[in-house]
Image: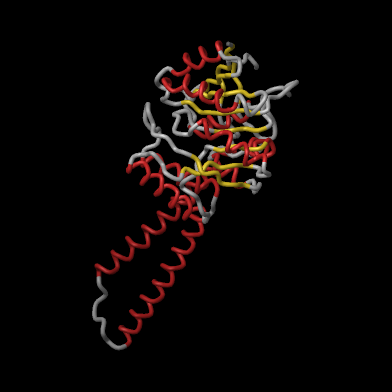
Amino acid sequence: MSAFLSFGSTAGRSPLPAPTSRPELSIVSPVYGCKGCLEELTERIAAAVGHVVGSYEIILVDDRSPDGAWARIAELSASKTHVRGLRLSRNFGQHAAISAGLAHATGLTVVVMDCDLQDVPEEIPALLQALAEGADMALASRIERQDSFFKKTGSRAFYRLLGWLTGSVYDPTTANFGAYSRKVIDAVNAMPEADRFFPLLVRWTGFEATLVPVTHAKRTEGRSGYSLRQLLRLATNIALSFSDKPLRLVVRTGLAFAFLSLCIVALSVYRYLIGDIAVAGFTSIVASIWLVGGVIVSSVGVVGLYVGKLHGQAKHRPNFIVAEDTAGNA
């Protein structure tokens, strides 16, 4: 095991030298809060794909899991030659951790899955079969999600809000779990976005996708790293990064209030001409000022959010930093 720093902007390049021989399959899994699942995860993956592909690698990316998962990953890497561990320098978030794994994955085909065993490893052969039949990416469709009512409700709210903000249709039964061809992963790695959201990035490529119904298991250890508040924040960040709809909504709101103002002015002039107004109302003036002021401040705020995103992107900071790699490659 070797410690080093690998800076993770994946735009157009891989941080590793070209391998002399690459495995047929890479399985990338971000790790956060599921230390006790890791051994079972690697064993079940090995049992599921060992008879399907000739060679494979499992890349476990520790997103600074608070339960000390790195020590377990290092142990598994030392005892299993097909397991590789990456440890990020701090918690960058699930999708940045996925990006780190993808940047280091060398397989001709790549599977992305969560580490908590809700993504069932035994479904991987079905995903690979879909690729063999001609698809560029096989997305796992969780027909019957084994999550709590609150998590399913939060997930549905997240995808509806995301779809409305970005003007796209999202299938709430799909997430990160899926199998992807090398050209899809290379295209995703070439994208320089600072805000990463893996499902949207792969869909944006436009390569042929197919849905594969899969079994979804109950979570046996730990809990989701996403609260409802975090999901809403993620949806907002994604909308600002991938869509200009909030800006267009601001323009439409401004036009609507301008039209409303013209109507109010016309009504006031009419009432003045017919002698219906003796003294201008103080309350209506104050209310109008507060209303228009609120719209202006909100509009400037939305524009400010976009300016902030541009500022963050312009700094060109890496999406992740790998502090340790059990493969020892710098």
Q: Closer to the camera, 23 or 198?
A: 23
Question: Residue 231, position in %: x, y?
Answer: 41, 42
Q: Is residue 25 above or below residue 202?
A: above
- For residue 105, which quarter of the picture? top right
Question: Residue 115, position in %: x, y?
Answer: 47, 28
- Horizontal arrangement in the rendering, residue 33 relative to residue 139 (left or right): left
- For residue 67, which quarter of the picture? top left
Question: Residue 303, position in %: x, y?
Answer: 49, 51
Q: How is the image coloured?
A: secondary structure
Q: Count the numbered circles shown.
A: 0
Quick one: which residue is furthest to the front in this view? 51
Q: Quadrant of the N terminus?
A: top right
- Horizontal arrangement in the rendering, residue 300 relative to residue 181 (left or right): left
Q: Quadrant of the C terminus?
A: top right
Quick one: which residue is furthest to the right in this view? 20
Q: Closer to the camera, 193 or 143?
A: 143
Image point 37% across, 39% down: which residue?
Answer: 147
Question: Residue 165, position in %: x, y?
Answer: 48, 53
Q: Is residue 244 above or below residue 119?
A: below
